[in-house]
Image (cartoon, rainbow, N blue to C red):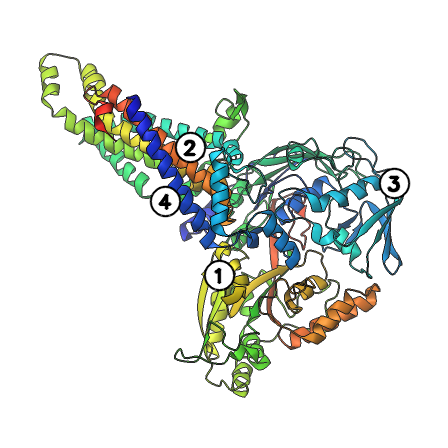
Amino acid sequence: MTSVRTPLLRAAVAFACAAAVSAPALASDLRIGVASEATSIDPHFHNLGPNNQVASQIFDRLINQGDRQQLQPGLAVSWKPIDNTTWEFKLREGVTFHDGSPFTADDVLCTFARAPEVPNSPASFSTYIKGKTFKKVDDFTVHVTTDEPYPTMANDLSVIPVISDEVGCGATTADFNDGKAAMGTGPFKFVEYVPGDRIVLAANEDYWGGRPEWDKVTIKPIKAGPSRVAALLAGDVDMISGVPTTDIGTLKETKGIVLSQGVSNRVIYLHVDQFREDSPFVKANGGGDIKNPLLDQKVRLAISKAISRELIRDRVMEGLSIPAGQLLPDGFFGVSDKLKPEAYDPEGAKALLAEAGVPDGFELTIHGPNDRYINDAKIVEGIAQMLTRVGIKTKVETMPRSVYFKRASTGGEGGLPEFSLILVGWGAGSGEASSPLRSLIATYDKEKGMGAANRGRHSDAKVDELVEQALKTVDDGKRAALLAEATERAMANLAIIPIHYQVNTWASREGIVYTPRSDEYTLAHYARSQ
Amino acid sequence: MSVFILRRLMQSALVMVAMAAIVFFGMHLVGDPVDMFVSPDMDQADIEQVVRALGLDRPILEQFWAFVTSALQGDLGQSFVFGQPALGLILERMPATLELAFIALLMAIVFGIPLGLYAGLKPDSPVSRTIMAGSILGFSLPTFWVGIMLIMVFAVMLGWLPSTGRGETVDVLGVPVSFLTLDGLRHLILPAFNLALLKISLVIRLTRAGTREVMLQDYIKFARAKGLGRGRIVGVHVMKNILIPVVTVLGLEFGSLIAFSVVTETIFAWPGMGKLLIESIQQLDRPVIVAYLMMIVFLFVVINLVVDVLYSILDPRVRLGDRGA
């Protein structure tokens, strides 16, 4: 129902905005309307944005992620490699769980034992835990060993919420949902969970990071965008996430409403079929067969040059995107400072097509989801028009993500990706460049666990080598350089064609400011009253 | 009558099996649920492990057989997304939806019948014309648009009622209901009215048509000639005769109120089963979808049965046993 938008509706929003915004509730209460609902309170049940978002407020991690996913001391005060294959974590002393029991190394050990083993989990945290051995040295020291040097240890452990040995580790997911086991060390205590309706939290008076500002936090899932906006205008919630782009203009003008915007770690990009001579959705002009021109780097570069990222930002995204030239926005670990977004150059694109032996272009179908990323279908339509202008006659096909992703990953012959040119997005959960590099760009290799989401099947041995080397380099400076080098090489070859980084918008009533987070999470302790 | 009921129930079992099969295989064709919920950072081995854990690696016929055998023992499978029994998830959200549907039904009767009766008795008065024009609007405006408008007017502009969500609930016999608290009632009004609007219009039209027809009947003239009061004529002789089509239609419509409150629940963030269904469809959560639709089929069968029984009470000429199916 997110597409409930009519001109009349917009007029109504504008009209309603003219009316005064209703009186807010008590200043120390915070009511948040969120776009997507958590499926469980069990922090290890499903490694999924909405669930992690709730867990981040009740539970701490050894290492917490800041607003730009920078690593910050959480339940660990320091961490360092003590030899090639061992990391030492010094734990915070004097921290207590919400039930008053002290936090020690035992809680850490049991957390990492439970997290990969939750029954019925649709996606567990085992990705981040496998291959690591945890050892308690004393109550406040833990050693983690791996077979090979493992530089991203801290990033891996920064995604897993720590639960209590006493009540949490032996508990089932149901025990968490009714609150019995939902005992963390985080800024808020669990109070109530009514599936589909609300999650209620209360301030943890003894939080080690200082008592949070809000006495009571109510998180309400309101899926329909217009309803979420209306709930904010009606004063039923104090803050909402995921403001629909069409409403941003109106809300900006509304008295009593403040917007917070921040760039996300999600890059929207095109994956290009780079492994088939006869790509199913590429045809010669007139519909005959043609050798897949997308295999040629020049053609891919032509596509990139043909796309005006500024126009997409201004016309499709209402200003809410940042043109992208690589996999993560500036400032994240491992990005290259040399890469800029490809400039719009239709003449250059035509010249490249001529050089590549297809001066008159060819026929192509671009595929994309229509309910996954902000304005996804509209972006695809815009790109198709731009490509058609330089001679690549492009048809558009968009579909719901439930249909799209299966076809895009394994819908073709022999379980190969079905499409030729697709729009996808990637959010780097770990907040550094090795995440997209190993999943999107490294050669698809089941054995090594590389390239799992490489739907274009780009393959470059040199990039693979750089990524693998980076994943073994513990020294931060050297690793960042290796990741940047790998990114530069991949971008030069147009392993993917980056379009933009998404910008997310939160809206709140006047008096509340939200610090936007690049992981798109909405956390009560990132909202402050003025 | 018991033979009649038994036969109905057996037929419904067949329909439910057919339904389950269609949805089961249909969902398989749509897409792969694993793509919907795995975390992007997972590598191929992790993904395969999820596929195996959910049993999705097995041939579809084998999966269906496993579903049928456990369904016969009352287990409709576990939700992929929630990891909980699908039926339990639905039942947990059912009271909210039933409450909404009942209130909407009540509104349809309370508003629809008097208004329709009035329009039928005085077809040419300006008030009747207004009622009929209003009922056309009720029919033709899309539910989601009306819902947003209701929120805009009553919650945002006037600030009389809350915009979304379900208010405070109290437990009655272990079932949480919200119509017994003031806060709950305030939350109920808008979504229930939104859901009821179409039904109110329907009832108005049915009642009006019935009233106009019945008023011309000989027995009404006779009753009048006999000198019966207007109140008695309308209250007994007219009402009893127009109620049969109204009850039939409302019975059927009640099913659709429950089954397809999806739009209203989504707009008003009402924590009912409709919202669960639409989210399950988006996530391809097959066990929940199959269980939901089977339950809805069952519900329709039961409602139709109740309607037929009511029929025989309202109209003594109807004998259930003779009617076969």
| Frontmost residue, B182 versus B64 | B64
Q: CA distance from mark 3 to mark 1?
A: 50 Å
| Disc 1: which residue | A377
Which type of secondary structure does the marked residue at label 2 adopt?
Answer: helix
Q: Is the residue under label 1 in contact with that under label 3 (CB below 8 Å)?
A: no
Q: Are marks 1 and 2 on the same chain?
A: no
Which residue type carries mark 3? Glu
The nearer-to-camera label among 4 and 3 is: 3
Which residue type carries mark 2? Ala
Write down the quadrant of residue B226 in the picture.
top left
Total marks placed:
4
Q: Is the residue under label 3 in contact with that under label 4 (CB below 8 Å)?
A: no
Which type of secondary structure does the marked residue at label 4 adopt?
Answer: loop
Q: Earlier in the sequence, mark 3 or mark 1?
A: 3
Give me the disc on residue B142.
4
| Disc 2: which residue | B192
Q: Is the residue under label 2 in contact with that under label 1 (CB below 8 Å)?
A: no
Query: Callout 3: residue from which chain?
Result: A
Relative horizontal placement of residue A501, taking residue A422 as reference (left or right) = right
Vertical order, B101 against A474 (above or below): above
Instruction: Report x, y in % for residue B281.
Output: 48, 47
Q: Residues within 10 Å of mark 1 (few under 14, many from 20)?
A: many
Q: CA distance from mark 4 to mark 2?
A: 15 Å
The nearer-to-camera label among 3 and 2 is: 3
Vertical order, B107 against A377 (above or below): above
Vertical order, A354 against A318 (above or below): below
Relative horizontal placement of residue A250, taking residue B301 as reference (left or right) = right
Q: Which quarter of the figure is the C terminus of chain B placed in? A: top left
Q: CA distance from mark 1 to mark 2?
A: 34 Å
Q: Is the residue under label 2 in contact with that under label 4 (CB below 8 Å)?
A: no
